Image (cartoon, rainbow, N blue to C red):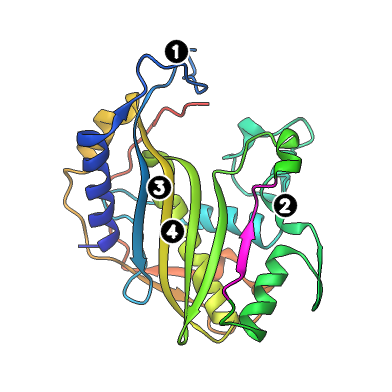
Amino acid sequence: MSKADDIFISMCKDILENGFSSEGEVVRAKWEDGIPAHTIKKFGVVNRYDLSQEFPILTLRPTNLNAAIDELLWIWQKKSNNIKDLNSGIWTSWANEEGSIGKAYGYQLSIKHKYAEGVFDQVDRVLYDLKNNPYSRRIIANMYNHNDLHEMNLYPCAYSMTFNVTGRKINAILNQRSQDILVANNWNVSQYAILVYMLAQVSNLEAGELVHVIADAHIYDRHVPLVEELIQRTPYPAPKLLINPDIKDFYDFKVTDFVLENYQSGPQIKNIPVAI
């Protein structure tokens, strides 16, 4: 059984059994038919994934890893805020006519700042420190820029990464203000695990732990029966992640440089309603 499945099942059971319902509250999100989208939530969920042991992808249902990596590269490598640079339609609802999502996500990572060591954007600063000062306790990338929130079409959900090297292992904390557990949980876990593997390879380090901190971990009301069915399924063993070993530059990675070997999963849940 995949450990990611164990973590997911345990988290969902806890939310469903011990979570707080937003019924009776005024909520921002609505379903396509205009009805308020209420949730059951837990505050401050913390999940730990040992990336040295296995790649944390769900087997209960498939996660589209190629699309998840494509979005990750769009944010962290291309540093883009335009959906024309993305090979899926996942951001279409938040983009304007020009394709921009405003000063969000990749835009924030592209802003250059002056440091004692030189001028870097946030990604290049992380890369510089991992190679030149790996044991620093200050290796952080943060996309939650209050000065620009009014110009973002959606505030960042997964908004910061803190990197910490212990021995030869790079560990990371992913901070997320809010998460739709059914739609996005394993998507984010898989893609930020990929980011840790990428940084490890180009920095001559090994992947360690990914700690995922979710402030508001919620299951939408219309997702409850889907989640209840999903966590009753029998998981499969975790697949093996293969990464092109020839890539030594962070900006050379492509989606095709990552392959899952022996990925088995249960059937996909089709037509999941998404609250906007």
Disc 1 from disc 2: Cα separation: 33 Å
Neighbor class of circle 3 (other Cα within 10 Å; few <14, some 14-19, many 20+) is some
* Image position, residue 3 (x, y; %): 26, 62
Q: Which mark is drawn over residue 80?
A: none
The tag earlier along the polypeptide, 1 or 3, is 1
Disc 3 versus disc 2: nearer the observer: 2
Q: Quadrant of the N terminus?
A: bottom left
The residue shown at (73%, 33%) is 150
Q: Secondary structure at mark 1?
A: loop
Q: Calculate the distance from the C-alpha at mark 3 to the C-alpha at mark 2.
A: 23 Å
Select label 1 or label 2 by which is in front: 2
Category of crowding for the residue at label 1, using alpha-carbon neighbours closer than 10 angstroms: few (below 14), some (14–19), many (at least 20): few
Within 10 Å of the Cα at label 2, are there few (<14), some (14-19), or many (20+) other Cα atoms? many
Q: Which residue is mark 4?
A: 190
- Residue type marked 2: Gln
Secondary structure type for disc 3: helix
Q: Can you identify the residue that label 3 sits on?
A: 185
Q: Which one is earlier in the sequence, the residue at label 4 or at label 1?
A: 1
Is the residue under label 3 in contact with that under label 4 (CB below 8 Å)? no
The magenta span reads 137-145
Q: Secondary structure at mark 2?
A: helix
